[in-house]
Amino acid sequence: MPDPTIVAGIDPVPGVAKPDAILVADGVKRRFGGLTAVDVAHFEVQRNTITALIGPNGAGKSTFFNLLTGFDQAQEGTGTFDGQPLRGMPPAKVARAGMVRTFQLTKALEGMSVMENMRLGAQDQPGENFFTAFVPPLWRAREREITEQAHELLHRFKLYEKRDDSAGSLSGGQRKLLEMARALMSKPTMVMLDEPMAGVNPALTESLLDHIIELKEEGMTVLFVEHDMHMVRRISDWVAVMAQGKLIAEGPAGSVMQNEAVQDAYLGAHHDTDLGEDL
Ligand SMILES: Nc1ncnc2c1ncn2[C@@H]1O[C@H](COP(=O)(O)OP(=O)(O)OP(=O)(O)O)[C@@H](O)[C@H]1O
Ligand SMILES: [Mg+2]
């Protein structure tokens, strides 16, 4: 359930400052040839919230995720994560700083087993340093730790029985779960999920929603992209809306969906999204 108290007092206007922002983006621009895919003047994510990033297809949501997590570089702009400047930081370093993401199209490595995928998720942990790698007792202790952590997460995501199966043999929904579990291997403080529920059957959708809520309960911050407004309303404390690269609205789900600019953006995009106003 959304928690209005943790965002109480924050004005629902695009670019508004948050009292305890974990992530800050400022003046971020990304152009592809003549197209400006992202042009976000200012955006902050309040710590320990579930924040949804919504907007019509092509609004720039995934590109913005890529920029924030180091998978793409902005032509202009700056950002900080937990006070650390993000500019020029490669994805592995961003992950070590505590921010991990999943992809819209799952990147589970299909030729590898579920367990091997989980081990890959651990590689960006602070323990993974040069010294540890060359001292066998430390290295073995680290391996055991990784195995235990992976088993624990696989139990939690109900994938333990599949641990030796090839990731390619999992259903679409199970792959989404694996991606989330793998992201947690690096013990992040912020998790960015790009359409975690897309293409997932209703039963697994419920469990994904529960997992997202759990992340917040454990103290993490979640920023997720989602097209299904009913899902967005059920779990988001705060909703940010992008259209044509810009942040056009933000606020609690109810007020954001009523916003005229948001409704125009969806209509203008001939989008068939049900904004869920009947809820
Ligand atoms: N690598 C690229 N090269 C050229 N254009 C790109 C590239 N990546 C994204 N774009 C364009 O940038 C715009 C924003 O794309 P993006 O994928 O960020 O949108 P989105 O909001 O995630 O959309 P969706 O909801 O469909 O996933 C689109 O017009 C897209 O075609
Ligand atoms: Mg996208």
Image (cartoon, rainbow, N blue to C red):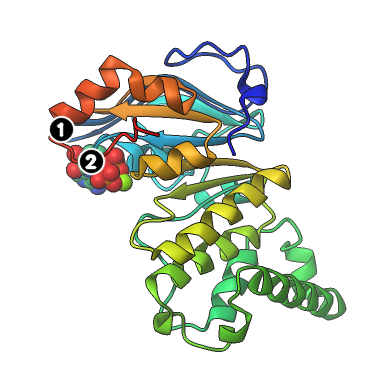
Residue 88 visible from this viewpoint: no
What residue did someone put label 1 on?
269
Quarter of the image where the N terminus is located: top right
Along the horizontal axis of the image, is 102 left or right of 96? Answer: left
**Residue at the extreme front of the image, as rendered:** 278
Disc 2 beta carbon < 8 A from ligand 1?
Answer: yes
Asked if the residue at tag 1 contacts the one at tag 2, i.e. Cβ–Cβ closer than 8 Å, the answer is: yes
Along the horizontal axis of the image, is 180 left or right of 160? Answer: left
What residue did someone put label 2 on?
57
Along the horizontal axis of the image, is 218 left or right of 199? Answer: right
Q: Which mark is residue 102?
A: none
Residue at (38%, 37%) from the top-left corner?
64
Q: Residues within 10 Å of mark 2 (few under 14, many from 20)?
A: some
Vertical side of 113 occupied by 245: above or below:
above
Residue at (53%, 41%) from the top-left corner?
235
Residue 187 visible from this viewpoint: yes
Amino acid bearing label 2: Asn
Along the horizontal axis of the image, is 186 left or right of 52? Answer: right
